[in-house]
Image: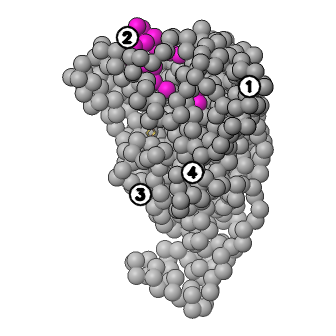
């Protein structure tokens, strides 16, 4: 039921007036077969679609856009599909993180520069979710997210395979000589069986789930497998709902508040989610003018049980999670840790959205009495190696390594690491601490997912499967191991990792939240005075802009000029 005057719609400025410019807009709409009956007095809904042939996780999104359009028409809106930069984790180099802010900027400016009254955002592969939302939050038009959905379970010789997690596991077995090429090729063909995002609780499923918790999807949307017919129905309902949202004038910054982010952080730990979510939530909050810090993540981690038994920290996959009741059922269980009064795109509260959810498999979604982990899935570390913080997913590490002292083996670049790691002469033991530097936001640049450093081959053959590893990089949400990540400030800008030398003692103490080198302060000061910054690798272009404006990991890696809520004028139409 319209609650706004159609003449107050943003799109009316393009289509409504009796003037020269509007004549142009209407005549070109006519050239595409549209009559005034299609759009006059109706909300124009931009369907921002990150479909591309080069992004397998989104390969079904052209079809889903049609389902959304059907819903928009049904509800009396006018759908316009607008393609946006796809961020495909598998093919895009050097890393999609290089382009998250570019897609965010593109989304905001697409919405600003075209006659959109509201938008439906189609994405799902890791960085697309935070990017699309960051842009939509900044533009602050009514917005609803349609997550791509996870792919079906992987299968190999009757064994269930999970994206990413099982790649690392079986690659290690191959390097150890336990798997032949025939088996490896079969795994290659069985691990990704359909359209959709990685079906472990990697970064994609973590970020789409947190998007639902923040209130930006229809209830239960994120758990539906990409190729399930329920996914099409969800897309259709999202198209219908966005038209209502425009009439209700329900905008992202009406939905988001401090408590919404607390809910998302609690859900991150209950899901055993990806460390990447820390960076993305910091950035998303910054777009809403809400300040959250690393300390808040640590505080919630200490108090939130892990309830989702999903790989890489648990046993099952997203398809099982869906059949077990999905995210609404998990949130229902987690309710004592949530603020259920937060508003969502349904126009109802989070509590109202999940009130009828039920758990159908209590081994997949655990009760508060029988969690996978009582607390501490992730820890924020500080110390003389990470003055502004570092992150470790403690739940994915071998427990014996959570308190560990060892001698550093330092790699200055990914290529150097690759060249030395399997050298039989490398003086490495299971107690060594592997360090990779120049892998942060400015240093790599783009902070790629290099933080899950490989185990040296000679140790793999001796049965070692986990070691302490430290870097200023990120790690794939599907990875596991005692990997200290996001060390901030990064080495490239002179963070203390830059001062570490081969053989230095490094002490990791997760229970005490410490990351230190035992090198004396005097010696570190001496090394600092001799340290010189390296040149960036981009003399021009987007890479140059990126390095000039990217912020550090503990601040969310947004561009400094994109943060905040300062109002930007609507475009003039002349
Ligand atoms: Fe796209 Fe994992 S590669 S979600």
Q: Which residues are magenta?
A: 453-471
Which label's residue is closer to the chain start, 1 or 2? 2
Marker disc for residue 461: 2
Residue annotated with mark 3: 66
**Cα distance in 3D space between marks 1 and 2:** 37 Å
Q: How many discs appear?
A: 4
Does the magenta run of residues contain 465?
A: yes
The residue closer to the viewer here, 1 or 472, is 472
Crowd rating for badge 4 (residues with CA inside 10 Å; few <14, some 14–19, many 20+): some
Give the residue number, with chain letter if any, for mark 4: 536
Q: Are marks 1 and 2 in contact (CB under 8 Å)?
A: no
Residue receiving disc 1: 523
* Badge 3: residue crowd in 10 Å (few <14, some 14–19, many ≥20): some
Q: Residue at x 74, y 31 (%)?
A: 526
75 up-or-down from 40: above or below: above
Mark 3 residue element? helix
**In this picture, residue 346 sits left or right of residue 542:** right
- The yes-or-no answer for disc 3 within 8 Å of ligand 1 is no
Q: Position of residue 248 (x, y in %)?
A: 69, 60
Queried whether the magenta region covers residue 366, the answer comes back as: no
Picture quarter containing residue 439? top right
The image quarter containing residue 183 is: top left
Q: Earlier in the sequence, mark 2 or mark 3?
A: 3
Q: Nearer the viewer, mark 4 or mark 3?
A: 4
Q: Alpha-carbon distance for marks 4 and 2?
A: 38 Å
Number of the front mark, 4 or 1: 1
Of callouts 3 and 1, the N-terminal one:
3
C-alpha gap between disc 4 and disc 3: 44 Å
Q: Which quarter of the rendering shows the C terminus?
A: bottom right
Residue 381 is labelled as none
């Amino acid at each position: 039921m319209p609650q706004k005057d159609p003449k107050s719609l943003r799109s009316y400025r393009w289509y409504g007036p009796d003037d020269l410019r509007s004549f142009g807009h209407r005549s070109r709409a006519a050239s595409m077969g549209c009559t005034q009956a299609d759009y006059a007095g109706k909300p124009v809904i931009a369907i921002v679609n990150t479909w591309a042939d080069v992004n397998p996780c989104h390969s079904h999104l052209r079809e889903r856009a049609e389902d959304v359009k059907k819903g928009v028409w049904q509800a009396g809106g006018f759908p316009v599909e607008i393609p946006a930069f796809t961020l495909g984790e598998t093919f895009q180099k050097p890393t999609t993180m290089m382009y998250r802010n570019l897609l965010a900027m593109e989304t905001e400016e697409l919405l600003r520069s075209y006659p959109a009254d509201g938008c439906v955002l189609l994405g799902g592969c890791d960085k697309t979710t935070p990017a699309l939302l960051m842009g939509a939050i900044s533009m602050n038009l009514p917005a609803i997210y349609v997550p791509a959905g996870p792919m079906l379970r992987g299968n190999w010789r009757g064994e269930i395979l999970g994206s990413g997690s099982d790649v690392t596991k079986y690659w290690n077995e191959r390097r150890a000589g336990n798997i032949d090429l025939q088996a490896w090729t079969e795994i290659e063909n069985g691990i990704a069986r359909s359209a959709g995002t990685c079906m472990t609780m990697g970064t994609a499923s973590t970020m789409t789930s947190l998007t639902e918790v923040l209130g930006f999807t229809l209830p239960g949307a994120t758990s539906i497998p990409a190729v399930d017919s329920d996914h099409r129905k969800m897309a259709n309902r999202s198209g219908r709902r966005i038209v209502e949202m425009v009439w209700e004038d329900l905008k992202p910054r009406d939905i988001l508040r401090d408590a919404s982010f607390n809910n998302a952080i609690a859900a991150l730990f209950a899901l055993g989610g990806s460390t990447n979510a820390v960076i993305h939530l910091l950035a998303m909050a910054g777009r809403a003018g809400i300040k959250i810090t690393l300390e808040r993540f640590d505080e919630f981690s200490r108090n939130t049980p892990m309830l989702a038994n999903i790989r890489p920290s648990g046993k099952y996959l997203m398809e099982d999670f869906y059949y077990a009741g999905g995210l609404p059922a998990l949130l229902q269980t987690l309710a004592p840790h949530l603020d259920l009064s937060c508003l969502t795109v349904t126009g109802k509260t989070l509590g109202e959205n999940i009130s009828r959810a039920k758990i159908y498999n209590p081994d997949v979604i655990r009760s508060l009495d029988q969690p996978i982990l009582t607390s501490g899935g992730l820890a924020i570390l500080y110390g003389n190696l990470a003055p502004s913080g570092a992150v470790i997913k403690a739940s994915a590490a071998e427990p014996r390594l959570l308190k560990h002292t060892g001698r550093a083996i330092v790699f200055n670049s990914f290529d150097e690491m690759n060249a030395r790691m399997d050298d039989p002469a490398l003086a490495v033991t299971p107690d060594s601490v592997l360090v990779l530097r120049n892998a942060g936001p400015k240093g790599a640049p783009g902070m790629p997912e290099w933080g899950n450093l490989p185990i040296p081959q000679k140790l793999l053959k001796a049965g070692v499967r986990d070691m302490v590893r430290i870097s200023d990089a990120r790690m794939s949400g599907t990875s596991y191991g005692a990997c200290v990540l996001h060390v901030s400030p990064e080495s490239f800008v002179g963070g203390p990792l830059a001062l570490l030398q081969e053989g230095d003692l490094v002490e990791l103490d997760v229970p005490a939240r410490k990351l230190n080198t035992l090198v004396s302060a005097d010696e570190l000061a001496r090394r600092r005075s001799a340290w010189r910054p390296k040149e960036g690798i981009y003399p021009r272009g987007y890479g140059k802009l990126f390095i000039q404006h990217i912020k550090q990991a503990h601040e969310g890696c947004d561009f400094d000029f994109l943060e905040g809520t300062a109002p930007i004028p609507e475009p003039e139409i002349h």
